[in-house]
Amino acid sequence: MTTGFRSFVIFAEMRTGSNLLEATLNRVKKVTCFGEAFNPYMMGWPDKEELQGVSRAEREADPMPLLARLFDKPGHLPGFRYFHDHDPRVFDAIMDNRACAKIVLTRNPLDSYVSTRLAQETNQWKLNETESAIPAAITYDGAEFQQLLAEVEAFQLRVMHRLQSTGQAAFWLGYEDLRDSEVMTGLLHWLGRSDIEQVDPARDQVPQNPRELADKVTNFGAMQADLARLDPFALRRIPNFEPRRGPAVPSFQVCAAGAGLLHMPIPGGPVEMLQGWMRALGAVSGNFNQNSLRQWKRAHPGHRSFAVLRHPLLRAWDAFLHLLTAARPDLRKLMREVHRVPLPEDEALADLAEDRTAALFADFLAFLRRQLNGQTTLPTHPVWATQSEIVAGFARFAQPDLLVRESRLAEDLGFLCRQVGIEEMREDRLAAEEHPDFLSDPALIAAARSAYLRDYVSFGFADRP
């Protein structure tokens, strides 16, 4: 064998033809596929409790010795099949092993779903030419199919991303390729077995249900109607070109009142007011790193964390005020000269008329739309980043227990205080902020929605604050 590959894994799913592919590979000398080696319900194949000298109990305790034993076959090409619901503890080791060839086998997910349900109904998982298929039909369950589809798609995207990010290539196979001798030969050549002139597909298995779907699904019409509502091309997807954010743990603050409150501030919201409210409840501390904050969380069982969401239009207004009053002068200069926000010179900013301010804010909203869509060279400032991405960044450390709406501060924070045993929640420290009347202009409302559509959809904001 003249290859850089010393092992392989077949990424597949139930009823994609992986049994046939395994049978084809196992007919080749010095190639062995050890079934579904990390299936939680069996050891490689049904009714087996041991594989390569490793018991099922030993695998459950630690799967790595089995992985090492499967791949420890010098002069041989070993592998196994791996599905989305197999032991996740070995996934990273597989993907990081460049000597492990990745084979990705796919099939029309609806065909796989129907075939799986038929096999479950009949308990007939393989069929050879001397056997007869057990006649059966299934009832399509839309919720079940869509859940399976989401899980499989997420897994395939995860595999593809890891391949791309590590600079690896996979051999991609479709269900229809498995009986094509030329494709099977190409696969073995890719694996390094160029000594083989031709690989014929295994012939000890035949298709079990070569009938039209209408004959295999009792509620075929209902299935068609349900599938028509799917969006396979993600036509309704909201494009997201915003860079991923980290959790920003140093900005978090904790209050010692009750069992403890943890505020995960979203820049551009009522952050200072919330800090004052927490200080009125008890001692406040901050400047954590991830390790020290975990220690605080361990020392305060029953604590609760929260973040406050602000309506996107009001948050954009806060970002605009930050640009006028707190941003560096060179950023305002860049806005004037490059980003089509014609701000007056700094000395004239304090005397802007209301109509001029409204027009500049409209220009700023147009800039925000371009910026959040990756159409500018500027980094995304936390003050104007989407709240969706900021909260997603929090989740890379810990998700907040409660997302509070600024419009419901008293009600939501009152609920939170009761959760941690704070009797007086100091509602008097939660005054609503004032905003100019021109923010009700329909044009500004539409511009804000265009810039922050992801937040409107994610958090259910109405058009008007």
Image: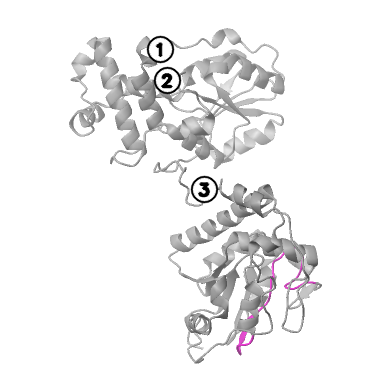
- Can residue 86 be seen in the rendering of this structure? no
The colour scheme used here is one colour
Circle 1 residue: 435
Circle 3 residue: 231
Q: Cβ–Cβ below 8 Å for labels 2 and 3?
A: no
The image quadrant that residue 244 belongs to is: top left
Residue 314 numbered mark, or none: 2
Q: Which residues are magenta?
A: 27-46
> At 67% across and 11% down in the image, what residue appears?
424
Residue 213: x percent and y percent?
64, 62
Horizontal placement of 436 versus 393: left or right? left
Tag 2 secondary structure? helix
Q: Does residue 48 sit above or below 380 in this rendering? A: below
Q: Does residue 459 sit above or below 66 in this rendering? A: above
Q: Work out whether mark 2 precedes mark 3 in sequence or the reverse, and give the earlier one.
A: 3
Q: Cβ–Cβ below 8 Å for labels 1 and 2?
A: yes
Label 3 neighbour load within 10 Å: few <14, some 14-19, many 20+: few
> At 67% across and 47% down in the image, what residue appears?
143
Q: Nearer the viewer, residue 163 or 63?
A: 163
Tag 3 secondary structure? loop
- Can residue 229 be seen in the rendering of this structure? yes
Front disc: 1 or 3: 3
Horizontal placement of 354 versus 417: left or right? left
Tag 1 secondary structure? loop
Residue 217: x percent and y percent?
69, 58
